[in-house]
Image: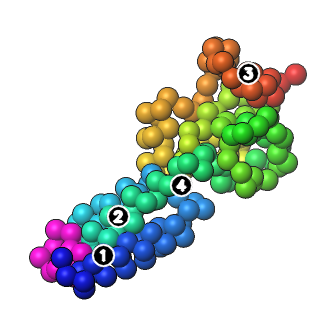
């Protein structure tokens, strides 16, 4: 491989990584990766060598988005006008004020009266609407959360967990 081709791949890898990373506040890493890989593969099928090597670089930069999965689940939108409760990834249950968005990772969340908890997988972004509906953001994160059997969980699920922090979170969801 010529030095020029290596430079093209390296440049497109770095630039695609940072372009995709700039959307990290709203788009989960799985969606960023999938989008970049589709674009990269499409470009790498080109007969033009420059476009082909750019496509390879974009694909590599896209795969690097998976590093963000290690940062855990995130609440990125909170339009709810009452307190919500989150299970910290490395801690206990914490109360958030209305509309507050934490800067840290979470394992789960709930609101009073839901009588359930919402399990958030690593790398998944969730939002809470003004009506209290909790959902994953648009994209591949919803699919990944489903495959990992995360999402809304009942009392029975909570009681079957060895991590008793889930029970603490569930208690916050009971209206009383």
Tell me which numbered mark, 1 or 3, is placed earlier along the sequence.
Answer: 1
Numbered label attached to residue 9? 1
Q: Residues within 10 Å of mark 4 (few under 14, many from 20)?
A: some
Tell me which numbered mark, 4 or 3, is placed earlier along the sequence.
Answer: 4
Q: How many angstroms separate mark 1 from mark 3 (CA)?
A: 48 Å
Check residue 50 for magenta coloring: yes
Q: Residues within 10 Å of mark 1 (few under 14, many from 20)?
A: many
Tell me which numbered mark, 4 or 1, is placed earlier along the sequence.
Answer: 1
Tell me which numbered mark, 4 or 2, is placed earlier along the sequence.
Answer: 2
Check residue 127 for magenta coloring: no
Considering depth in this image, is 109 or 40 the residue closer to the camera?
Answer: 40
Q: Are marks 1 and 2 in contact (CB under 8 Å)?
A: yes
The answer to whether 130 appears left or right of 73 in the picture is right
The answer to whether 102 appears left or right of 54 in the picture is right
Tell me which numbered mark, 3 or 2, is placed earlier along the sequence.
Answer: 2
The answer to whether 34 appears left or right of 2 in the picture is right
Q: Which residues are magenta?
A: 43-53
- What residue occupies the far left of the structure in this picture? 47
1 or 3: mark nearer the eye: 1
Q: How far across and how far down the image is residue 26, in percent?
A: 57, 60
Q: Is residue 103 above or below residue 87?
A: below
Q: How many angstroms separate mark 4 from mark 3 (CA)?
A: 27 Å
Picture quadrant where residue 109 is located: top right
**Residue beneath label 3, please?**
164
Q: How many angstroms separate mark 1 from mark 2 (CA)?
A: 9 Å
Q: Secondary structure at mark 3?
A: loop
Q: Are marks 4 and 2 in contact (CB under 8 Å)?
A: no
Residue 126, visible in the rendered structure: no
Picture quadrant where residue 157 is located: top right
**Residue beneath label 4, please?**
68
């Amino acid at each position: 491989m010529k030095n020029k081709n290596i430079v093209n791949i390296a440049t497109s890898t770095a630039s695609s990584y940072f372009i995709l990373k700039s959307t990290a506040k709203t788009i989960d890493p799985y969606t960023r990766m999938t989008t970049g890989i589709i674009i990269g593969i499409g470009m790498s099928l080109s007969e033009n060598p420059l476009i082909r090597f750019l496509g390879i670089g974009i694909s590599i930069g896209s795969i690097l988005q998976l590093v963000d999965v290690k940062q855990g689940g995130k609440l990125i939108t909170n339009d709810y006008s009452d307190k919500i409760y989150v299970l910290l990834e490395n801690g206990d249950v914490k109360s958030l004020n209305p509309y507050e968005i934490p800067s840290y990772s979470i394992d789960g969340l709930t609101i009073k009266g839901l009588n359930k908890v919402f399990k958030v997988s690593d790398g998944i972004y969730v939002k809470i609407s003004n009506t209290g509906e909790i959902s994953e953001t648009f994209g591949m994160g919803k699919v990944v959360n489903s495959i990992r059997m995360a999402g809304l969980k009942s009392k029975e699920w909570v009681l079957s967990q060895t991590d008793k922090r889930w029970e603490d979170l569930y208690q916050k969801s009971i209206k009383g």
